[in-house]
Image (tube, helix red, strand yellow):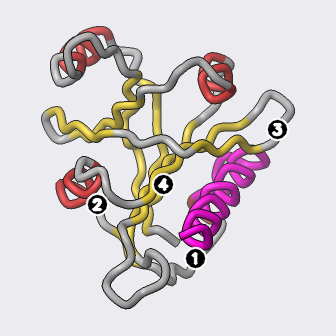
Amino acid sequence: MKKVLVIAAALVLIACVALAENPDAFTSASVNNFYGGIEGDDLMNAINSYSGFYAVSSVNPDGTPNVGFYIYGCVKLEDTYYLQLGLSPNQTTVNVDNGSELVAMYACLPEEGATYPTSGARMNLKKVEDEAVLQELLKTAPEGYTPMYYEVTLVRPLG
C-alpha cells in the first residue's frame, strides 16, 4: 500500500515540477503512456466511488511542488466535468490564492492480483470563476458544505 501511494505521489510530483518550469511540460513530458486511462463518465463515476488513490498538486511560491492527498468528488454540468474540492486552509489553498495551477491525479484500485494501480487519470484544472456556473455547481454540494470547484480542462492517462 505504501508503495502505491509513493508511486502515485511521484507521478503527481513530476507533473507539478513540469508545470513550475514550463506550463506546456505536462502535456509533452512523456510521449509514452505505460498505464491506462479513463475519462468522461467512467472517470467521474470512479472518482465518486471514493475508492482508489487521489492527489492534488500545486506549486509553492518558491517554485517547489506541493502534493496533497485529498479525496475529491466529480460533478458533470452539461458536457463539462468539475472537481469538487473541500480543502481546509493549508499550503494548497495559499497556492490557489496565489494563482497556482492545480493538477489532480486519480488512480483506480489495483486489479486483482496486481500490486499497484495501472489505470486512472491525470487532470489539469482551472478554477471556476463564473458566478452562474458556481451557483449551479453549489446545488450539488452537501448541505452546509461549500467546496471549491475546478473545471477539468485536460485528461491524460495515469502515466
In space, the residues marked 2 and 1 are separated at their CA atoms by: 18 Å
In space, the residues marked 4 and 1 are separated at their CA atoms by: 18 Å
In the displayed structure, does residue 95 sit left or right of residue 83? right
The residue under label 1 is 31
Give the main secondary structure, helix, strand or loop, of the magenta stretch.
helix
Mark 2 and mark 1 in contact? Answer it, CB < 8 Å.
no
Question: Considering depth in this image, is 45 or 111 the residue closer to the camera?
Answer: 111
**Identity of the residue furthest to the bottom in this view:** 113
The residue under label 4 is 105
In space, the residues marked 3 and 4 are separated at their CA atoms by: 20 Å
Which mark is in front, 3 or 4? 4
Which mark is in front, 3 or 1? 3
The residue under label 3 is 63
Where, by quadrant of the figure, is residue 130 drawn?
A: top left
Judged from the image, the secondary structure of the residue bearing numbered disc 4 is strand
Question: Considering depth in this image, is 44 or 18 the residue closer to the camera?
Answer: 44
Disc 2 crowd rating (10 Å Cα; few below 14, some 14-19, many 20+) is: some
Q: Is residue 108 magenta?
A: no
Judged from the image, the secondary structure of the residue bearing numbered disc 2 is loop
Q: Which residues are magenta?
A: 1-26
Mark 3 and mark 2 in contact? Answer it, CB < 8 Å.
no
Disc 3 crowd rating (10 Å Cα; few below 14, some 14-19, many 20+) is: some
